[in-house]
Image (spheres, rainbow, N blue to C red):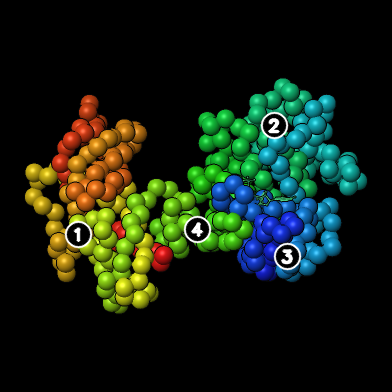
Amino acid sequence: MLIRFENVTKRFGSFIAVDNVSLDIAVGEFFSLLGPSGCGKTTLLRMLAGLETPSAGRILIDGVDMAGVPPNRRPVNMVFQSYAVFPHMTVADNVAYGLKIDRVPRAERDSRVAEALALVKLDDFAHRRPDQLSGGQRQRVALARALVKRPKVLLLDEPLSALDAKLRDAMRGELAAIQREVGVTFVMVTHDQDEALAMASRCALMNRGTLQQVASPGDLYEFPANRFVADFIGTINLFEATLAVDETDHAIVRTPALDAPVYLGHGVTGATGAQVWVGIRPEKITMTPADAPRPAGPAAMPHANRTPGTIMTSAYLGAVTLYDIHTSGGTLIKVTAPNGTRSASPALPAGTQVWLHWEPDAPVMLLA
Ligand code: ATP
């Protein structure tokens, strides 16, 4: 294990910014710390960098306890949000700066700078000054400057937030590709879930100083550990419900929000009668016109997992159309329908009566 947080807590006065976090990060991971503003993710990163000291717990890098090790003696390098580069130096001099400070001999310095600039595709810009570069290119200078020192860990604090939306999208792919190429462990802080899910191999989602779930992007989305995770990652329809049946191969949940019970194709671990949340992602619900044959529910419970509704609004989003559907029980449900074929009128009009239905593996059940 390259990085280990052991029961790390950080207090500012009586305020607990990071609350008993234990977390392992392996060599070569692109790891993301994700969560809403104020959740403690930057504080966790700053403790790893040595810019803050834990109030309790230990941080180990490569098995070495970092307590008392100053930032410049840790095998980490940080790329900041504002991608500060020296304006009066050329790109090459900016990248070479840290190596000069470390008294790396000239020849080695030159070859390492050339290598780092090639990596971030700035070989042709070595003699430009930062004010002659775009925002994305300046960000790549900052990245090259950090990577040229060959840290074991590169820490990135909201690295793309200063870029405009289009550039940010392009840089996501590039940053992930650079990480794969150099194989250096990246730990990135972001509040932008799309950014984390697109780039990271694993994410830690935090809330109010505590870890909520550590998992791959796919697992965070498909198998959220609790209501906070389900709600934070992507869009989900969440209903307060009661666990009515819990067997090894199925479970049944009843919610006042829907006319029909929700049938899950697997057992859950909860006491019968427990108050739970049941969640269904908009793309996992199928919509069929009300005048089509009534969709059949699961064989074991044909009237489950379906509800009639009325389209209230639709938003055409290109690849999909997002519908708000009012059920007869008075609940608003979000459903996305793929626009798989070209059509002049891809959205069904408001007022259309529909059936909503879903497979037994579509819902997630979360303990309240
Ligand atoms: P953001 O996305 O807004 O940067 P964050 O999740 O990175 O948020 P942190 O910067 O880690 O959050 O801060 C966590 C909490 O700790 C916040 O409530 C913040 O106000 C508080 N905090 C951070 N640094 C200090 C400090 N030096 N003194 C007092 N409180 C602090």
Q: Kindly identify the amino acid type of the residue bearing the numbered disc 3.
A: Ile
Nearer mark to the viewer, of 1 and 2: 1
Q: Is residue 58 above or below residue 39?
A: below
Lower sequence index among marks 3 and 4: 3
Cα–Cα gap, marks 1 and 2:
56 Å
Mark 4: give few (<14), some (14-19) or many (20+) Cα within 10 Å. Answer: some
Q: Can see residue 141?
A: yes
Lower sequence index among marks 4 and 1: 4
Q: Kindly identify the amino acid type of the residue bearing the numbered disc 1.
A: Ala
Mark 3: give few (<14), some (14-19) or many (20+) Cα within 10 Å. Answer: many
Seen at 27% across and 49% down, the residue is 331
Lower sequence index among marks 3 and 2: 3
Secondary structure beneath dot 2 equals helix
Q: Are marks 2 and 4 in contact (CB under 8 Å)?
A: no
Lower sequence index among marks 1 and 2: 2
Lower sequence index among marks 3 and 1: 3
Q: Is residue 267 left or right of residue 87?
A: left
Cα–Cα gap, marks 3 and 4:
22 Å
Outermost front residue: 14
The image's mark for residue 216 is 4
User: Mark 1 highlights which residue?
Assistant: 260
Secondary structure beneath dot 1 equals loop
